[in-house]
Amino acid sequence: MKKTTVCLVLGIFLLPALVSAHGPSRQKVSKEIEINASPDKVWAIISDFCSIKNWLPPVTECASDDSHEANTLRTLTLANGEVLIEQLLKHKPEKMMYQYMIKEANVKALPVSSYGSTIMVQAGENGGSVLTWKSGFYRGYMNNNPPPELSDEAAVTAVSAVYDAGLGKIKELAEQ
Amino acid sequence: MKLRKLFFSGLVLFFPFPAFTATLAYVTNQGSNSVSVIDLQSNTVINEIKVGNKPAGVVVSPDSNRVCVSNPESKTISVIDTNSNRVIHDVTTGDGPLGIEISPDGKSVYIADWYRHTVSILDTDKLEITSSIRVGHSPAGIVSDIDGDVIYVANRDDNNVAIVNLNTASIDSLIPVGKAPFGLALSHNKNQLYVANVQSSSVSVIDLEKKKVIRDIDVGLFPYAIAYVEKLSRLFVTNQWDNTVSVIDLEAYEVLETIDIGEYPEGIDLHPSGDFVYVANWFDGSIAVVDSSSMKLLHTIKTGEGTRAFGRFVLQK
């Protein structure tokens, strides 16, 4: 009985005091794809902050106020029922880019924390486009010694898979 | 007396100029587990030194003979001899070494531990951690005052800065600042401390006599680190998520200029002359060279993967 109490008390001290820290090293993913369609056409597909529901397969719903002002939120519902809230930081039609972040990490939706991302369209060869999607983020586990599903590698793998799926779908839509 | 005079004039003849031969930058590349050595006269990388895992923080010793690097993933400090450009010691420390500073006499290295919420003190003679001081949650940037009696520590998850008295090894005061304070810079002549608040996208100016914030200046998105250029009375602040550097005029406490710099600018330091500021672009793996007077980007030097360089990384030999 006494032993249990000691263990419990120790346990409380060993718990991380706060969970707002993050992993020791930021990770990055940068993917691009060439598209045989004009930059205007590609931008028209992605420019709306909630267009993601049209071109990212696991996203089943997106809700936002349709504004493109800084700090606009979008609430994504994924096929597994998880919800992710993202916040727009910049939306620049003249540069065909926007930048956003995950407002509060949900590792069941994406195993990352402190995630910031940019998607942009640039002119490519022969009137085509180059679409780039990139981000910096920390792993999902905020303390030392992460479980494998919340490691640096797991975070990079998950984000890479999302980007490959999204870029592939945008290319398909633009080249139709 | 005559002899002495002769001796001194001889010295003057022999060393008519300060004997600096090189100005160098030692920048940590978190993705390549290395430090790039850059010659700042030619702005070229002249060496790459393998260090521990995921090196982040860096500090140069007052005599320029050593550079210490924090490796959060291997939980060590790599000590580099700048004459041979080799790692001569690896010191095991804590759980998450990040911010790093050295005392003015070069005898103590202060290491912020992101997970233990302490500052560890490394004795540079014994080459071991001799003590640690509890600070706040997830300490990041550290700076020492010029007397070596006090260090200032940004407690990222407590939204405050600790003034730590090194003689009593205890916190003298905690000063509330913005959200998620990270990099710090000190002005001795103004008796001010500058704090980059990552999540409030601002810089707090602390009056060290009053021990409180006297100004909050909005900068770009997610400011990370700060360089203070005394002769121009300016701060240069890296804005990670804006790919810019904000230049703050400390007479008016206003942003003078915003410079497009590179992707995810993080660590920042200045040339000893104050003429140039050097910025680590994490996403690009490069160092940007900025003219501090004209506030123009002059060059970008390719380094390694994930150049972070959080701390003081420029030295003169």
Image: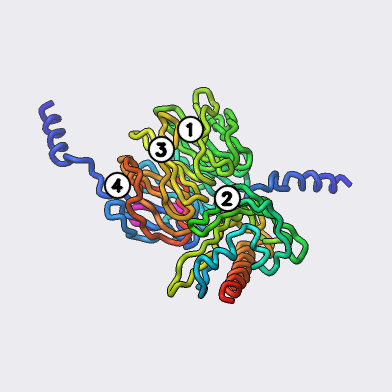
Q: Are both tags, 4 and 1, on one chain?
A: yes
Question: Which residue, given by chain and number where applicable, does mark 4 sit on?
Answer: B317
Residue drawn at x 45%, y 70% is: A124
Report the mark closest to the observer, 2 or 1.
2
Residue type indicated by callout 1: Leu
Please give left or right for residue B225 compared with residue A169 in the image.
left
Spatial CA span between label 4 and label 1? 28 Å
Q: Which mark is residue B256?
A: 3
Residue type indicated by callout 3: Leu
Compare residues B31 and B172 and report the one nearer the observer: B31
Residue type indicated by callout 2: Leu
* Mark 1 surroundings: few (<14), some (14-19) or many (≥20) residues within 10 A: many
Which element carries disc 4, helix, strand or loop?
Answer: loop
Q: Are both tags, 3 and 1, on one chain?
A: yes
Q: Are marks 3 and 2 in contact (CB under 8 Å)?
A: no
- Magenta range: B78-86
Question: Which residue, given by chain and number where applicable, does mark 1 sit on?
Answer: B193
Which quadrant: the C terminus of chain A? Answer: bottom right
Report the mark closest to the observer, 4 or 1.
1
Report the mark closest to the observer, 3 or 4.
3
Please give left or right for residue A50 compared with residue B142 in the image.
right
Spatial CA span between label 3 and label 4? 33 Å
Which element carries disc 2, helix, strand or loop?
Answer: strand
Question: Which residue, given by chain and number where applicable, does mark 2 sit on?
Answer: A89
* Mark 2 surroundings: few (<14), some (14-19) or many (≥20) residues within 10 A: many
Task: Indicate whether B147 appears above or below B240.
Answer: above
Report the mark closest to the observer, 2 or 4.
2
* Mark 4 surroundings: few (<14), some (14-19) or many (≥20) residues within 10 A: some
